[in-house]
Image: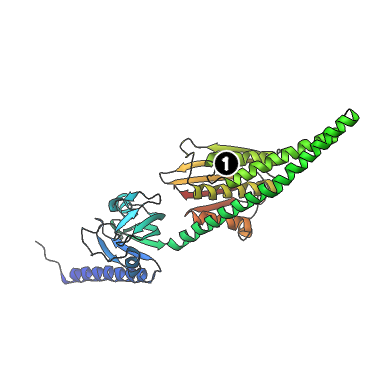
């Protein structure tokens, strides 16, 4: 067997030292992150974790121990509360598929029973030859944000109920009294003069229709469960057609697009579509608008709003309240948004969010 010469031995030592130095540098970077971070080898054994991960998990797992594979948490759950086995978590999927999973929400249960919400960013690690040598997962604690969102939701629901109550007990009752009084005056006029004013009759019908619309609005405000997402989108399209009959709005839905979407995701997506439609109707002078709803891959929903209007320069409009609000809503859903437009040409707004 040929023995390596001293020069070859020295090259091996240098390569090993470089790899070791690179790993140490990588770990120092993870230590500085304001988030939990840990790494696993290709078999899922934990090879490193920072102190933020310990605080998030509520425990410190043993390194390279088969008992703690893929994650150092006590228990894991999906957003809907269903349990997730450690070998099905985002880190395990990243190692299995050799693909990245970013901004994926997960619920971590500590040994004491406390549950925290986090966004996982699990990505494979490769050597210089492209071989899989492990994976890193960065866990961003969003528990306080989720609590704040829930509190805000409760405040909004309370405000909706208050507005509905004020409309019903105040404006709607006053409107009903006016209609009743006018109807009595109309009947008296008909009795005394053997006829009645057609203009008065028309105004009474208008008030009745207004009262009916207001009653429906009160019902919608009091309704705790919003309509299914597709139904809400269809209603939004109908409203835009009524407001701008000259602008054709077409809805295209992929066959496997879900009919219902969880309230938070559906609500935010609906507002994004609404803002994009408003921009197309009020600012672009578009004659045709297309709304596309589709599923991308196995874990993403895509919403597109395209128009044939005047277009604009996205770079100069990024600071606008409407577009900034759309970006914030997409960010809350852990997704991304792209706007493609040129002055004098069509505009395309494309939103991609994780399947809830």
Residue furthest left as drawn: 1
Question: What residue is pinned by disc 1?
Answer: 233
Q: Position of residue 139 (x, y in %)?
A: 38, 61
Left or right of 44 on screen, residue 305: right
Of residue 134 and residue 255, the one placed in the foreground of this image is 255
Height in image: 138 above or below 199? below
Colour scheme in use: rainbow
Q: Position of residue 289 (x, y in %)?
A: 63, 41
Height in image: 298 above or below 122? above
Of residue 261 and residue 87, the one placed in the foreground of this image is 261
Of residue 111 and residue 6, the one placed in the foreground of this image is 111
Count the marks.
Answer: 1
Residue at point 26% right, 69% down?
Answer: 20
Rendered image quadrant of residue 245 = top right
Residue at point 58% right, 45% down?
Answer: 305
**Residue 346 visible in the displayed image:** no
Q: Position of residue 258 (x, y in %)?
A: 47, 40
């Amino acid at each position: 067997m040929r023995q390596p010469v001293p020069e070859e031995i020295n090259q091996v030592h240098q390569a090993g030292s470089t790899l070791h130095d690179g790993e140490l540098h990588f770990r120092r970077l993870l230590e500085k992150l304001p988030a939990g971070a840990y790494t696993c080898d290709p078999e899922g054994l934990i090879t490193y974790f920072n102190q933020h991960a310990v605080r998030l998990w509520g425990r410190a797992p043993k390194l390279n121990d088969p008992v703690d594979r893929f994650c150092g948490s006590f228990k894991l759950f999906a957003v809907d509360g269903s349990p997730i086995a450690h070998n099905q978590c985002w880190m395990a999927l990243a190692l299995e598929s050799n693909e990245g999973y970013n901004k994926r929400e997960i619920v971590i249960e500590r040994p004491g029973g406390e549950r925290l919400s986090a966004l996982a960013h699990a990505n494979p690690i490769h050597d210089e030859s492209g071989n899989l040598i492990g994976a890193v997962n960065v866990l961003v604690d969003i528990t306080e944000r989720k609590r704040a969102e829930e509190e805000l939701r409760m405040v909004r629901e309370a405000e909706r109920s208050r507005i509905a109550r004020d409309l019903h007990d105040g404006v709607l009752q006053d409107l009903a009294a006016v209609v009743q009084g006018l109807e009595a005056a109309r009947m008296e006029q008909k009795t005394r003069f053997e006829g009645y004013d057609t203009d008065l009759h028309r105004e009474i019908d208008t008030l009745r229709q207004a009262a009916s619309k207001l009653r429906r609005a009160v019902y919608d405000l009091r309704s705790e469960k919003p309509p299914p997402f597709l139904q809400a989108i269809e209603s939004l399209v109908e409203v835009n057609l009524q407001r701008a009959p000259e602008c054709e709005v077409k809805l295209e839905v992929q066959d496997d697009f879900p009919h219902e979407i969880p309230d938070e995701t559906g609500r935010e997506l609906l507002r994004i579509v609404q803002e994009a439609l408003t921009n197309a109707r009020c600012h672009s002078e578009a004659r045709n608008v297309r709304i596309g709803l589709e599923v991308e891959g196995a874990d993403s929903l895509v919403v597109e709003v395209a128009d044939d209007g005047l277009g604009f320069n996205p770079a100069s409009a990024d600071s606008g309240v409407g577009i900034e609000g759309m970006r914030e809503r997409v960010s809350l859903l852990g997704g991304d948004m792209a706007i493609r437009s040129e002055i004098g040409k069509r505009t395309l707004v494309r939103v991609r969010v994780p399947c809830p």
